[in-house]
Image: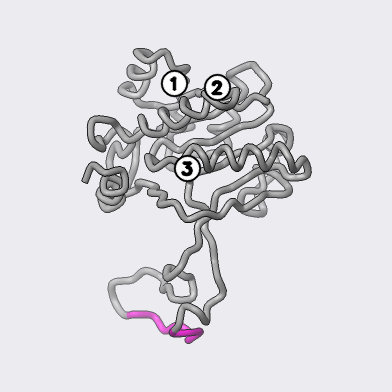
Amino acid sequence: MSVLSIVTVRKGSKGLKDKCIHHIGDKMVFQYTLEYSLKIARHIDNTTLVTSDSTIVGDFCKAWHIPFIKRAPELCSEKAEIEDVIYDAYKRTQREFDYISLLYGNVPTRYPLRFIEAYNFLEHNKDYDCVLSMQKTGKFNPSWMFDYTDKTLPKKKHESARRQGLQEKMIHDGHTILFRPKHFLEFMESKKEKEYMYEYLGRKIKPHIYENIVVDIDDYNDLVIAKAVIGCG
């Protein structure tokens, strides 16, 4: 079964400028995602495609003979939707694939085994459209959170002072997004407005929960943590 892995690398960023081309050791952040995708290709029929507005990323892909799409400006703005980026990249391949894998270029902490597990799940569970990796929120539970302000702490109804007393929550960590194209293409071509989170990925989505440390780099602190996790701190 064939997989199209779309690596998204956007030049702009509010939290950390040019976050995807910062270095962790002797590699740029997005290189870790590329190497992960290429490693998966040793085990699965996986085609890697990079979409970016960065000349640095484009030159790197050219030198390494990795398929590259120069992303249109309207798909690089802060208001651009990721599903439009995926749709643009998929249609421009002019090929059909059994699965699409979305790989964010700002997530350098990668675990190929987690992808293989997601792939095998979809292969054996045809009623599911997508596998989405999730992490437990732990102490970062919404019940303990306040709306941001540096003035006066807002009043918030007391729920529990103990973590054990809170309802467990989970959040997508950015590592694995693997889905079948059929529902995605139907959703995109219908021009339907989104009502639910991730509904463009499928009607039935499997949350893949594991405890590997995944760092989604959005600010400088994330970069420091990623360096420590990878061993380049």
Nearest to viewer (mark 2 / mark 3)? 2
Q: Which is nearer the eye, 220 or 215? A: 215
Q: Earlier in the sequence, mark 1 or mark 3?
A: 1
The magenta segment: 153-161
Colouring scheme applied when the structure was drawn? one colour
Side of 114 where 9 appears, left or right: left
Side of 219 where 141 appears, left or right: right
Nearest to viewer (mark 1 / mark 2)? 2
Asked if one can make out residue 208 in the rendered structure from this viewpoint, the answer is: yes
Image point 67% across, 42% down: which residue? 121
Judge whether residue 195 is colored magenta. Answer: no
Q: Which is nearer the eye, 185 or 164? A: 164
Nearest to viewer (mark 1 / mark 3)? 1
Q: CA distance from mark 1 to mark 2?
A: 17 Å
Within the image, what quadrant is residue 144 found in? Answer: bottom left
Q: Which is nearer the eye, 120 or 54? A: 120
Residue kind at label 3, given as amino acid type = Lys
Q: What is the secondary structure assignment of the residue under circle 2?
A: strand
Q: What is the secondary structure assignment of the residue under circle 1?
A: strand
Disc 3 packing (10 Å; few <14; some 14–19; many ≥20): few
Magenta span: predominant SS is loop
Disc 2 packing (10 Å; few <14; some 14–19; many ≥20): some
Judge whether residue 154 is colored magenta. Answer: yes
Residue kind at label 1, given as amino acid type = Lys
Estimate the x, y position of residue 185 in percent, counting from the top left: 70, 32
Q: Which residue is mark 2?
A: 47
Q: How many marks?
A: 3
Q: Which residue is mark 1?
A: 70
Q: Which is nearer the eye, 51 or 76? A: 51
Estimate the x, y position of residue 24 in percent, counting from the top left: 26, 37
Asked if one can make out residue 81 in the rendered structure from this viewpoint, the answer is: no
Picture disc at residue 79: 3
